[in-house]
Image: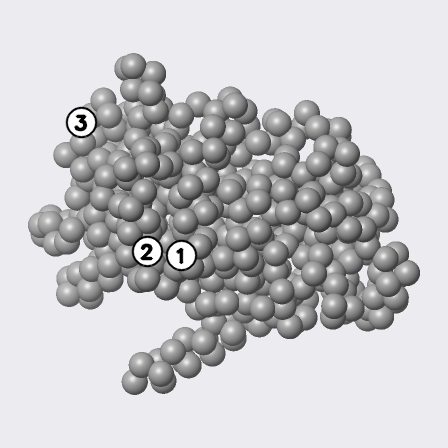
Amino acid sequence: MKEALSSMIKLDKKYDVIIVGAGVAGLNCALNLPPEKKVLVICKDTPDKSDSYLAQGGICRLPADSDYDSYFNDTMRAGHYENNPASVDAMIRGSQEIIDDLIALGVDFARNADGSLAYTKEGGHSRPRICFHEDTTGREITTHLMSAARAHSNIFIVPCVTMLDIICDGSRCYGIVAKDGKNGRLYRLYADYTVLASGGIGGIFENSTNFRVLTGDAVAVCLQHGIAVDHINYIQIHPTTLYSKKKGRRFLISESVRGEGAVLLDKHFKRFTDELKPRDIVTAAIREQMAKDGTDHVWLDMRPIPGDEILSHFPDIVRHCLNEGYDVLRECIPVVPAQHYFMGGIRSDVRGATTMPGLYAVGETCCNGVHGKNRLASNSLLESLLFAKRAAQDIGAGYTPIDIAAAAAAEGALDLSKYSNPSRLLKEYKQMLRAAIDAENSRTLKENA
């Protein structure tokens, strides 16, 4: 695979598949497409600026068939039973295959003394079933997927290129409009299939664990074109991010920390909740305690975990807290909830297909119903990888090239003045998303009144 700085290359007019996003969903989709297909993967910033790269806790795997019912029920209960059972079933039954794929790529999951996979437990899980690599599981997986992609001559990854729109005629997607952040070129690119894998929406919130560049542009584009978007107000808040008065992305304190025994304390250093409840319940308890105490944060105590386990399982958290002035081996750390994950998104089915032919959506930017109203911890990497692979397989199985004349007609109908100021357009997309979220929240409040 050739990878180049976008300022040094000129993109071709036509690709077989264009993938928007270079996180685990985008990369795994690319790797599972037929090897003869010419694949372009673009990302808004550098490839490491994805939430996949930041994931700490781990990735779920069905440890044994006997755990199926428990795992299914845990996922449904965390999602307030608003999940799509078919999506949940597909995710769980495909989990072993996905972990095997990752191991084959060289991903180094923690192991027991006998060589078997070690599992950890997080909030909402009734038993340990989460594979992990220290507290940097996302980085471990993403870097191995990227290395594998680099070995494929048909996959071309270009950083610092932002999708501004799709090219479509209302009945089919023919590609994308994109702006090169380095050289300012405006591209109108054709593709037989377009896959949206552009991540979450944390960049539209003041406090988020997400990279700031993740602003839900693909969701806004779909709203604009009448492509179905579901549950746009289903936004998960992570209970524990490191409290800071600094601006910027919030540092996540993994749920695995509480799964291994860390406890939450009020201003008097008294425990006030069950730390292993689903995230939305723990978040509500923290906010209630903060209001009661009149504080901007609560405390997280990792000291109930053996020191050697803290150092081996959570080295990145230990290092980051030390850099912020906290020694987790000797003192509590201040934590506060922050926006973390988007359960809503572009409607897609168990094949990753959206309501527009030729257009797929996978990963956090889509909503296939697997998470319901609240995501169960460590289902995100699994869901992204599995349904991205399914999308690639579906594209390969029913591959149909676009009609170039129809694509050219759709391109000709574009109002190019819309893209003359990309910063303004992206700001409009952010405003569109916030307005849609607020409107849905208002509607929900009225229905529940």
Residue placed under numbered mark 3 in the picture:
306
Image quadrant occupied by the N terminus: top right
Mark 2 belongs to which amino acid?
Answer: Met
The 10 Å Cα crowd at callout 1, few under 14, some 14 to 19, many 20 or more, is some
Which is nearer the eye, 3 or 61? 61
Secondary structure at numbered mark 3: loop
Is residue 329 rendered to the left or right of residue 388?
Answer: left
Q: Which of marks 2 and 1 is in front?
A: 1
Secondary structure at numbered mark 1: helix
Q: Are marks 3 and 1 in contact (CB under 8 Å)?
A: no
- Earlier-in-chain disc, 2 versus 1: 2
Give x and y (percent) for residue 49.
56, 43
Please give the count of numbered marks on the rendered protein. Answer: 3
Q: Are marks 2 and 3 in contact (CB under 8 Å)?
A: no
Q: Do the residues labelled 2 and 1 touch (CB within 8 Å)?
A: yes
Mark 1 belongs to which amino acid?
Answer: Pro
Give x and y (percent) for residue 343.
44, 58
The 10 Å Cα crowd at callout 2, few under 14, some 14 to 19, many 20 or more, is many
Residue placed under numbered mark 2 in the picture:
76
In the rendered image, which quarter is residue 156 located in? top right
- Earlier-in-chain disc, 2 versus 3: 2
Which is nearer the eye, 393 or 150? 393
Mark 3 belongs to which amino acid?
Answer: Pro
Q: Can residue 266 be seen in this view?
A: no
Q: Residue at x 39, y 28 (%)?
A: 133
Give x and y (percent) for residue 232.
48, 67
